[in-house]
Image (tube, rainbow, N blue to C red):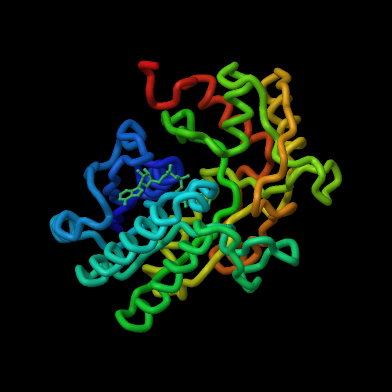
Amino acid sequence: MKVLVVGGAGYIGSHVVLELQQAGHDVYVLDNLQTGHREAVATAPFFPGDIADNELLSRLISEHRIEAAVHLAADSTVGLSMQDPGIFFNNNVGKGALFLDTLVKTGVKILVFSSSAAVYGSPDNMPIKESHPLNPVNVYGSTKIMFEEMMHWYEKIYGLRWMALRYFNAAGAAPGYGIGEDHNPETHLIPIILQTILGQRQELQIFGNDYPTPDGTCIRDYIHVADLSRAHVLGLEALSAGEAGGVYNLGNGQGFSVREVVRVCEAVTGQKIAAGISPRRFGDPPVLVASAEKIKSELGWVPQYPDLESIAASAWEWHRLNPNGFNKQL
Ligand SMILES: NC(=O)c1ccc[n+]([C@@H]2O[C@H](COP(=O)([O-])OP(=O)(O)OC[C@H]3O[C@@H](n4cnc5c(N)ncnc54)[C@H](O)[C@@H]3O)[C@@H](O)[C@H]2O)c1
């Protein structure tokens, strides 16, 4: 298939590009580089631009006969969404709506979308199934639901075939292919631990050690970015074969506390780090663990790196080789 990946210069997007190419698809990337890196897209045609640019998008789709798309282009710093919600409504919803409209009106009716566990808020039942009520506790999660709803209506009205993959915590890298996580500012736990190990931060701040969990710190479900990316390939292929889409959780079904993640990173790197305790952050649920049974049974998705050691080891390899991320000049 000829697949357009928007947001393909970002952390997850660049790994999705790699998996799609390895599965034999022709990939084209559009990204405005607001958080992405041009260097992360070494092997696919790259188009600098915005998802809201109807003219550029229409031209790209018709010139390259695009048949399907993956949409990862969004603002995703959860805390920022509660300080400046307009950024999120504008990009994730407003520009997302323009993008979706251009897609279907240029005849692209297969779409896989990056949704998030943030749609569930602070869930009551664990592991979380797709049928769990949606109750986001931040604007970011709410914008993901809004885009899911748009796809639902575009299915009814235009026959869009879509899939929303609700990612839990993506981590890890493909260091052998020169790609890994490089967000600025970094808000994700594993890269922050590894930056602390590299001496780029003085200590790790743990937000809350009084949660109702065995060691008092929050528990999350980590999924290797390669496993997550492969699910996009399965999703696109299933949609193109005429199978029904819908929403799917993507996690490993196993939770690790912040302290456990620190221990695994220390074991993988052979180094200890200092950790301080800060107050809880608003809206951080104690435990978030996915049930990924639906995607396993319906799409045959099988994680190849379900263990946290492999995830942390690949992330460490990337950070060790690229301590300044893609910006080698620093
Ligand atoms: N990282 C995670 O653990 C996680 C978890 C759940 C969901 N997600 C979702 O996955 C997607 C990718 O996340 P990521 O961690 O790779 O983030 P990222 O910031 O690294 O990637 C997003 C990419 O989209 C591009 N982009 C943003 N707005 C754009 C626009 N209007 N036009 C063109 N390009 C635009 C950015 O430049 C960047 O390259 C996001 O939609 C995010 O909400 C991520």
On screen, residue 182 above or below 320: below
**Side of 201 relative to 148 (left or right):** right
Q: Tell me where residue 60 appears, x and y as whole percent.
A: 17, 54
The residue at the far right in this view is 214
Where, by quadrant of the figure, is residue 107 drawn? bottom left
**Side of 216 relative to 292 (left or right):** right
**Side of 108 relative to 220 (left or right):** left
Residue at 86% from the left image edge and 45% from the top image edge: 214
Q: Tell me where residue 194 appears, x and y as whole percent.
A: 60, 26
Residue at 30% from the left image edge and 34% from the top image edge: 38
**Side of 298 relative to 56 (left or right):** right
Residue at 67% from the left image edge and 51% from the top image edge: 284
Q: What quarter of the picture does the C terminus occupy?
A: top left
Q: What quarter of the picture does the N terminus occupy?
A: bottom left
Residue at 39% from the left image edge and 72% from the top image edge: 150
Q: Tell me where residue 283 appears, x and y as whole percent.
A: 65, 54
Closer to us: 81 or 260: 81
On screen, residue 40 above or below 166: above
On screen, residue 307 above or below 90: above
